[in-house]
Amino acid sequence: MPTIKSLDDLKRIREEALEKRKVKTASGQVQVIVGMGTCGIAAGARDAMKAILETIQNENLEGVIVTQTGCIGLCEKEPIVQVVVGDQPKVTYGKVSPEVARQIMQEHVKNGNVVKEYMIQV
Amino acid sequence: MKMTRSMVLVSSDPISIQLGAQEVFQALQEQIKAFGLEEEISLTMVGDVGRHDALPLVIVYPEAVIYGPVTPEKVPYLVEEHLYKGRIAEELVASVRELSGRIAWLHARKGTLPAEQRIVLRRAGIIDPTSIEDYILNDGYTALGKVLTSMTPQEVIEEIKKSGLRGRGGAGFPTGTKWGFVAREKSEKKYIICNADESEPGTFKDRLILEGDPHSMIEAMAIAGYAVGADEGYIYVRGEYLLAQERLKKAIQDAREMGFLGKNIFGTDFNFEIHIHAGAGAYICGEETALIESIEGKRGQPRSRPPYPTTHGLWGKPTVVNNVETLANIPPIINNGADWYRSFGTPSSPGTKVYTVLGNVNVTGLIEVPMGITLREVIAIYAKGMKNGSNFKLAQTGGSSGSIIPASLQDTPMDFDSYTKAGVSLGSGALLICDEDTCVVDLAKVLLNFFRVESCGKCNPCRIGTQRAWEMLDKISKGQASLSDLDKLAELSENLYMLSNCGLGQTAGTPLRDILNYFRAEVEAHIRLKVCPAGVCKMEELIPLS
């Protein structure tokens, strides 16, 4: 990792990361974000995560990045999975069981159709 | 509480009543019925809303428009315009004379939904907590850079003082003042402690901040270190928070590798190092002096104060002890300035507060809202009403050491001063909402059982007092108490408050005082009639003497 010695270093690193991210979104990369705060994990986020990773492996999906994040404040709706396809707006799904996760991966990530019935308002 | 689209409140303090609030209320009732809106609109009479120049006032949510003075003749127009057609009846809106506190806040957000205002949680749930790159992408470490390269320690403290930030652990002590105390001490070694031993039952805000945004703690502690002249910090994390510890460890390691911790940060001669210290599950270690003892490797018992940790803290050195949420507020204040921060919340308690909402409500979870919101708003807007349409009976703020808030206080703005004035306390941010099926004696018994177990035993009033109070409540809940026990209970609550060494004992008496103040009839029913009105306590059959 680069060491930061001044404010300019910080700015430069920020810019580089921003650039990297832009390239990723421009190439239509899919980002799947799983809420992995304690509330999410207690509601079964690990199972959803596992199902997502399995689907990616079984289907040989390419260009999909799976990341985790903390609690977004909707503990009631956990496990929460967010999907960002390229530069399209973020879609948030609530109460994602492993089955729902597989469905999202099939229909949204693979075929590009939002799974409306599990979408939630943020 | 049903789900409704609008909420109409009529002020009913004595002056409003005198000026015809009752008639206005009736007229509203009739008109709402005439338009067939009674299913969609809730109508309530509330107490003093904090403004006395245009009574009686009618406040309509979610737009938060204040109408006044309203007379029964004006009601049909108001209902037709605002509630039926959905337009704000401009000519009836109360003129702005003197805006202060909550009213100013209501006014500022006129025409908009009282939206959540995310300062502390702005990154939680958006960034990957294990990635320092994500944090930097979202303005991470810019505040630290700004402080180190362009501000003197005095300027930092002044900025925090100006922002009016108050400690979010429950006591509400001004953070800038605390930093000032430590900064003026002459000592070659000072410490920053982040109190993440969040052991209040029902509070989980700090946990989710740490899990969602661990780098913000590191940045804020380094800023605090620079401001007061400390070069070492401790994060005292609750033992049960394994995930938070894991993420903090990763964050500290990453920050060290990138040079945000260690020697010569940002090329200056400022050094800072952070250690994690895991608690072992004792409630008392959330008290700052007990926490310090625990870090020193001693038994977790509070010290006598004064001297305060600001002069004699960790290993006898001046120490800043700040709550996680307090620290999380620091980087945004530095980045955006004190005036920006003051634009949220009320004048005496600026900023936002993170609450964890739980209990008999439809939606539980974490919210961050400006200071000065009321319980009624929290329940209706964020918690989406009471579960199963039941009625709100009481709320318990701030875990077990907070107050019991009766329904009559649900329109009191939730900020430090308004709550102190009303004789209750805000606590650390848990809102346990209870419906009518909750028995106050049972609730107090559960709380006192907690205190009796968690009391460290150092001072007699707390060690024995909490035990005796629990025994008395147990007696009441079994229908075996006498009325004189209530007087003893009141005296005990007073003694706990006055004689205990630390916050644990001092607040242990609060639930007793509150239930006797607000729910005396219900408590007496347990004694006089030997029934529990809520049907919770099981009265033991008295065996007749043969």
Image (cartoon, coloured by chain):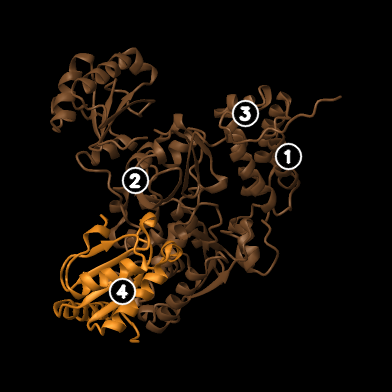
Chain colours: A orange, B brown
Check disc 1 and give the amino acid type.
Glu
Sequence-wise first label, 1 or 2: 2
N-terminal-most mark, 1 or 4: 4
Q: Residues within 10 Å of mark 3 (few under 14, many from 20)?
A: many
In the picture, measured across the screen, residue B191 lies left or right of residue A83, that is right
Helix, strand or loop at disc 4?
A: helix
Q: Residue at x 30, y 71 (%)?
A: A102
Mark toward the start of the polypeptide (2 vs 3): 2
Cα–Cα span, label 4 and label 2: 29 Å
Q: Earlier in the sequence, mark 3 or mark 4?
A: 4
- Residue at figure coordinates x 37%, y 42% from the top left: B378
**Residue position for label 1:** B471
Query: Is B77 above or below relative to A12?
Result: above
Mark 1–mark 4 CB contact (< 8 Å): no
- Tell me the distance, in whole angstroms, between the alpha carbons under discs 3 and 4: 54 Å
Structural crowding at the residue carrying mark 1, measured as other residues with C-alpha within 10 Å and reported as few (<14), some (14–19) or many (≥20): some
* The N terminus of chain B lies in quadrant: top left
Please say whether residue B89 is visible from this viewpoint.
no
Which of labels 1 and 4 is toward the front?
1
Of residues B491 and B391, which is closer to you in this image?
B391
Numbered disc in front, either 4 or 2: 2
Say which element carries label 3.
Answer: helix
Are dots 1 and 3 on a single chain? yes
Marked residue nearer the N-terminal end (4 or 2): 4
Specify which label sits upstream in the sequence, 1 or 3: 1
List the residue tagged with mark 4.
B134
Task: Return the x and y of residue B82 as percentages of the image width and height.
Answer: 17, 29
